[in-house]
Image: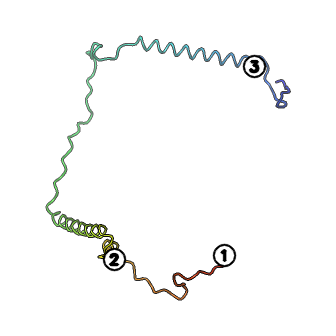
Amino acid sequence: MASAWTENGPISLPSRTIAYGAGLAVVLFAVLGVAAGFEAASRRGMGPELDAAAGAGAKDDALVAKPIVDLAPPAPAPEAAKDNADETDADAAKADALAAQTAAAQAIQAKPASAAGNIDEVLTSPTEKPPATPAKGADEAPPGSPVKSDVPF
């Protein structure tokens, strides 16, 4: 390896024979790759036709493919039992109650100027209603009074 001074500083350069040998190897591999590609393309064009209509059909000694296991056709879904009638009635009752609740909410939304009801009260079940709010304490300032603060702006 020869050491040479370039504009970026001292670097180590390989000898000329090694550099030319590596370049020649790269060019040789490129030419061989292109030749192999052309050879594969020409070989594919000369291959036997795989089209069934153009071919002679199946050979006499060819085996016919048979499944290892014969699968039965899928069974139809079982019919609903008659014991589900009570569940169906309960589901229908829930659906009717939900429809009535939705209709009441839509009626309130259709008339925004009337004070007939509050949509939150209609759509909220008794178990979901929040507890009553506590009365305002002495710490809170009445609305409209100026707020005193230490912030200068």
Residue 106 location (% of width, % of height): 28, 66
**Residue, x 35% and y 73% (percent of image)?**
120
Quadrant occupied by the N terminus: top right
Kind of residue at disc 2: Thr
Residue 12's disc is: none
Helix, strand or loop at label 1? It is loop
User: Label 2: which residue?
Assistant: 127
Between 39 and 130, the residue placed more toward the observer is 130
Q: Quadrant of residue 50?
A: top left
The image's colouring method is: rainbow
Q: Which residue is mark 1?
A: 151
Of the image marks 1 and 2, the number of the one nearer the N terminus? 2
Which residue corresponds to mark 3?
18
In the picture shown, does residue 23 fall above or below 123? above
Which mark is in front, 2 or 3? 2
Report which quarter residue 128 is drawn in: bottom left
Spatial separation of the CA atoms under disc 1 and disc 2? 44 Å
Q: Picture coordinates of residue 19 (x, y %)?
A: 74, 19
Answer with left or right where residue 82 lies relative to residue 60: left
Quarter occupied by residue 87: bottom left
Across and down, in percent, residue 139 comes to 55, 86
Q: Quadrant of the C terminus?
A: bottom right
Observer-nearest residue: 116 or 101? Answer: 116
- Residue beneath the point at 48% across and 86% down: 136
Please tell me how many numbered marks the rendered image carries. 3
The mark closer to the camera, 1 or 2, is 1
Mark 1 or mark 3: whose residue is earlier in sequence: 3
Q: Residue at x 32, y 17 (%)?
A: 51
N-terminal label among 2 and 3? 3
